[in-house]
Image (cartoon, rainbow, N blue to C red):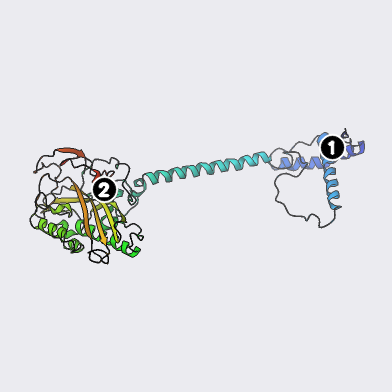
Amino acid sequence: MSTVPPPERPDDDASREASSSISDEQLDAFLRESTGGGGAPAPKEPSARARMVAARLREQDEAARRAQGSRSPGRWPRRKRKAQGPPPGTPPGWRTGPAWQEMNGTASRRRRIGAVVGVSLALALAVVAVRPSLLLDRIPGPETEAAADGASPLPAETALPTAAPGEVDAVLPTLAHPFRGSPAARWADGADAIELPEAKAVAGLTEADVKLALRRTKEFLVAANLDPEVIGGGQPDRALELLDPKAPAMLTQLRRSLRDPTRNDDPVGLFSRFDPKQVQLAGDVVRVRGHMSFAAGRPGEVKVHADYSFVYPLVRAGGDDDRVARTVVRRGLTLTLADPRKWIATQGKLIVEEYVVDTFNNECDVYDGYLHPVFPGADPTGAPPTGPAKDPYDRRQSLADVEHQGCGKVTRT
């Protein structure tokens, strides 16, 4: 087993040389200069042992430099390195300025302060993301309906939702904010809310054919439910033009219902119309929420299914009453576009396969071709409701799957 020899002790000459490294004259001059300017007290002279250790360390450093200089040039190229700490062999805290641990502590405190600021900023941004009204209410400019209600617009619907919309503040709508106090405050406006899914070829039809079917379906929804003339009680001529004349039974039925509405043939099953002698639209905006999809039918057919809710804010005709009533109409319909080379059909025209409608805040058992809203504080003039109460904004169930239980009350409008 090998042993490490003890370090050599410096001889008396080296000790004396280390102890005499600072003369009395130099020490006196240093003390006079330090105390004369009113500065900090002069440092104490290092002890004889400290001077001896420093001398020995200087000798070791000098020996290391001589040994490095004896190596072959070019074998380890010299590179400048950034200083990472005090020179080797230097006693901590002596002629090195602040101790390195203290300097690192200062940097750490700065990092902690920066981290606290960063966390605070992140929390502030998160609060604004959840409640944008905290920021938007302080920005000058026109106030949107969603911002007025402290809510952000909803993303587009692509399928039936899995939950009903949450509760909102039960405040009455106004002419300036006709959708305030309802989930429709977060819905999109009019035709822009009807977004088409990406088309693809199906059932022997090309992608262009499917795009045409989707586009025609949107045109029908707009013409039947968003055309101001139709909403104001006019004839849905554009919507009827989109239907295939080679399927005459449906066209005959719809025209008869518009001319002579009955319980079994009421045009509000497909068209949103209000009696212009009684009510008119409050403003020019209708809020819309829903989605569209398509699937292959028989060879050469594509079926487009649409499920949309329309919210109409209304005031009494004549302008004597500024109270706002909202009627909600939810429609589900399936339209077919067929290849005329395979079926008796007209190019680009739609065939109504089926449709179902549910209306809310509409007088019960009135079949005159119009929808009749009930205004806040007014008593209904139609038959009393007999069905269960429903939320008109709850779109979780398909209309085809909802069993009709008669005209009921609404939990909100």
- Helix, strand or loop at label 1? It is helix
What kind of residue is marked 2? Ala
Query: Neighbour class for label 2 at 10 Å: few (<14), some, many (≥20)?
Result: many
- Indicate which disc residue 161 carries: none
What kind of residue is marked 1? Met
User: Where residue 334 sits in the image (x, y, percent)?
Assistant: 25, 54
Which quadrant does the N terminus fall into?
Answer: top right
Is 153 positioned to the left or the right of 235 in the image?
right
Which residue is the site of mark 2? 184
Give the Cα distance between marks 2 and 1: 87 Å
Q: Nearer the viewer, residue 142 or 39?
A: 142
Which residue is the site of mark 1? 52
- Helix, strand or loop at label 2? It is helix
Q: Are marks 2 and 1 in contact (CB under 8 Å)?
A: no
**Which residue is at 18% across, 37% downward?**
388
User: Where residue 396 sits in the image (x, y, percent)?
Assistant: 29, 43
Residue 82 position (above or below residue 7):
below
Instruction: Say whether residue 143 is visible.
Output: no
Residue 212 position (above or below residue 159):
below
**Which residue is at 21% across, 63% downward?**
242
User: Where residue 300 sits in the image (x, y, percent)?
Assistant: 30, 61
